[in-house]
Image (cartoon, grey):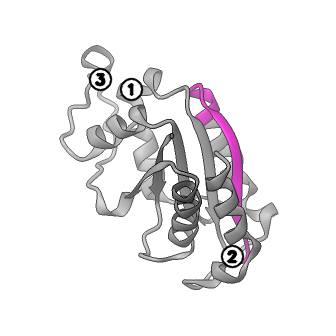
Amino acid sequence: MKHVLILSASPRKNGNSDILCRQFMRGAQDAGHRTELISLYDKSTEFCRACYACFTTVRCVLRDDMEEILDKMQQADVIVVATPTYFYSMNGKLKTVIDRFLPRWQNLGGHDVYLIITGHDRKEGLKLVEEELNTIFTGLGNQVKGCIWGEEVWQKGEVENTKAMDEAYQAGSHI
């Protein structure tokens, strides 16, 4: 049994990214794995101040929910990262969280990582987000095992009638 941590950067409850996260989670649970879903918009995460105090303390000077998120990331076997695409990039909430990896970046490797990327474009328009997240997570020493593409979805719930639903479930059930 693996511990699967799902980080959803969707600002919309039950939006397309959230729906795919829950589908991945259902697949993982059906396969007997332990899952946890964190909605990043429910967490307080301030912007990195680039003070670099964490280089000596291994803790951030900001007191918000990032320490809890980093603890859970370190404890997980599998990390799923989901984001809607805004102007060909990950959304700001996910970028803020990633910037705050700094205190523990050397201890965030060794995980299998899955990406969930949604947006109104086809895959070609979402590809930059996948490349960026792949670079970040492999650079930390993780292995990106796959990407679920919620392409050509805009309105809440549109992803429910796409092949991404089955892909998310299958990815979760085969970790």
The earlier-in-sequence mark between 1 and 2 is: 1
What amino acid does circle 2 point to? His
Q: Residues within 10 Å of mark 1 (few under 14, many from 20)?
A: some
Residue depicted at x 36% and y 37%: 70
Mark 2 and mark 3 residues within 8 Å of each other at the beta carbon? no
Q: Secondary structure at mark 3?
A: helix
146 left or right of 42 in image: right
Q: Is residue 105 left or right of residue 151?
A: left
Q: Position of residue 10 (x, y in %)?
A: 47, 66
Image location of residue 171, percent across then percent down = 67, 54
| Cβ atoms under marks 3 and 1 closer than 8 Å | no
Q: Nearer the viewer, residue 166 or 139?
A: 166
User: Mark 3 belongs to which amino acid?
Assistant: Cys
Q: Residue 153: x, y in percent?
A: 67, 78
Which SS class for mark 2?
A: loop
Residue carrying label 1: 104
Q: Marks 1 and 2, how far apart in space? A: 34 Å
Gap in angstroms between the C-alphas marked 3 and 1: 8 Å
Residue assigned mark 3:
54
Label 2: which residue?
Answer: 120
Which of the image's four quarters has the C terminus?
Answer: top right
Against 98, residue 86 (above or below) is below
Q: Is residue 104 magenta?
A: no
Residue at 64 percent of width and 54 percent of height: 173
Per the model, the C-alpha gap separating discs 2 and 3 is 38 Å
Which range is magenta?
Answer: 137-152
Sequence-earlier tag: 2 or 3: 3
- Which image quadrant for residue 42? bottom left
